[in-house]
Image: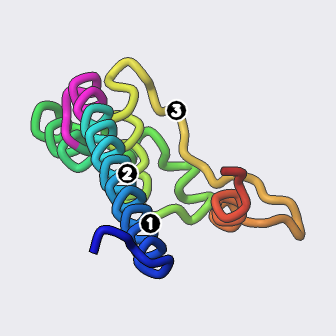
Amino acid sequence: MGEMSTGQIAIVILTTGLVIVFAVLVLLILIIKLYSTAVHTAQKKRRGTDDIETTVASVSQRHSLPSPEPVSAAPAAANDISPEIVTAICAAVYALYGEETPILSVRRAATRTGSRSAWRQAGAYSNTRPF
């Protein structure tokens, strides 16, 4: 029993290697989870809010949002932008930049004939960006 055969040595080496690889993998997963938790906590402290829904809700509760009709009545009518979309754009700008940013107009972005839409470009970029 003192001497091991070649097959037994191979099984011990294989088992030891697998245990070490999976232990290091679990360790790396824990390190990445801890790092992401730390980064997420730091970002929440810097922003002061949990997420964008909380931001929009708190802004709309604290202040009345600017009305989109007087600000963008002509551009909305000219470009067929519904008042709901203009209101959402105004709320997003207000939540991001605060009261000091005036919204002068809301209009559709000009597109060239044959060019990709903004959503299509964003999708192509996110699917082909480098690692």
Q: Amino acid at mark 1?
A: Ile
Expressed as whole percent of the image width and height from the top left, the position of residue 86 reads 43, 52
Q: Is residue 119 left or right of residue 104?
A: right
Q: Is residue 37 above or below residue 128?
A: above
Say few, some or many: other residues with alpha carbon within 10 Å of mark 1 (under 14 / 14 to 19 / 20 or more): few
Q: Which mark identifies residue 24? A: 2
Question: In this rendering, which labeled residue sits more in front, label 2 or label 3?
Answer: 2
Instruction: Kindly state the secondary structure of the residue where label 2 is placed.
Output: helix
On residue 104, which mark appears? 3
Distance, label 1 to label 2, CA atoms, is 17 Å
Crowd tier of the residue under label 2, counting other residues whose Cα lies within 10 Å: few below 14, some 14–19, many 20 or above: few
In the figure, 100 relative to 23: above or below? above
Q: Which residue is mark 1?
A: 13
Which of the two discs, 3 and 1, labels the residue nearer the N terminus? 1
The one of 66 and 3 positioned closer to us in this rendering: 3
Magenta residues span 41-50
Q: Does label 2 or label 3 sit earlier along the sequence? A: 2
